[in-house]
């Protein structure tokens, strides 16, 4: 069974990056968890001081929701 892939475009100031994730948990709840994680991402950015910090914190944030960063 193939894992679902999720893509998000991150932006912090003038910096932008696209990251890809796959779901490691129950596929039945994937869309809801993905939506919840995206909506809560703004809170992560409020506590970061630079793009590198935001990138790392965003990856951790999505991992808490059951998604793993994949290289593309």
Image (cartoon, helix red, strand yellow):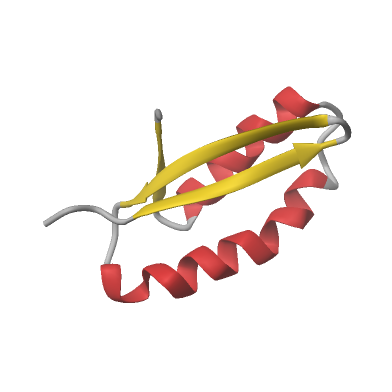
Q: Is residue 36 left or right of residue 40?
A: left
Instruction: Between residue 58 and residue 47, name the one nearer to us.
Output: 58
* Residue 6 image position (x, y, % from top left): 44, 53
**The quarter of the displayed image where residue 57 is located:** top right
Vertical relation: 29 (above or below) 2: below
The residue drawn where x is 77% and y is 55% is 42
* Residue 28 image position (x, y, % from top left): 29, 76
Instruction: Between residue 27 and residue 7, name the one nearer to us.
Output: 7
Q: How many marks?
A: 0
**The quarter of the displayed image where residue 52 is located:** top right
Instruction: Between residue 6 and residue 49, name the one nearer to us.
Output: 6
Vertical relation: 15 (above or below) 58: above
The residue drawn where x is 53% and y is 38% is 19
Vertical relation: 56 (above or below) 66: above
The residue drawn where x is 72% and y is 34% is 54
**Quadrant location of the N terminus?**
bottom left
**Quadrant location of the C terminus?**
top left
Q: Is residue 34 left or right of residue 17?
A: left
Q: Is residue 6 left or right of residue 9?
A: left
The residue drawn where x is 55% and y is 41% is 60
* Residue 10 image position (x, y, % from top left): 68, 42
């Amino acid at each position: 069974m193939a894992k679902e892939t999720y893509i998000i475009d991150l932006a912090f100031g003038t910096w932008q990056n696209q990251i890809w994730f796959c779901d490691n948990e129950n596929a039945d709840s994937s869309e809801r968890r993905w939506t919840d994680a995206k909506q809560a991402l703004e809170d992560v950015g409020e506590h970061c001081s630079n793009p590198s910090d935001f990138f790392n914190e965003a990856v951790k944030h999505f991992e808490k929701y059951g998604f793993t960063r994949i290289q593309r």
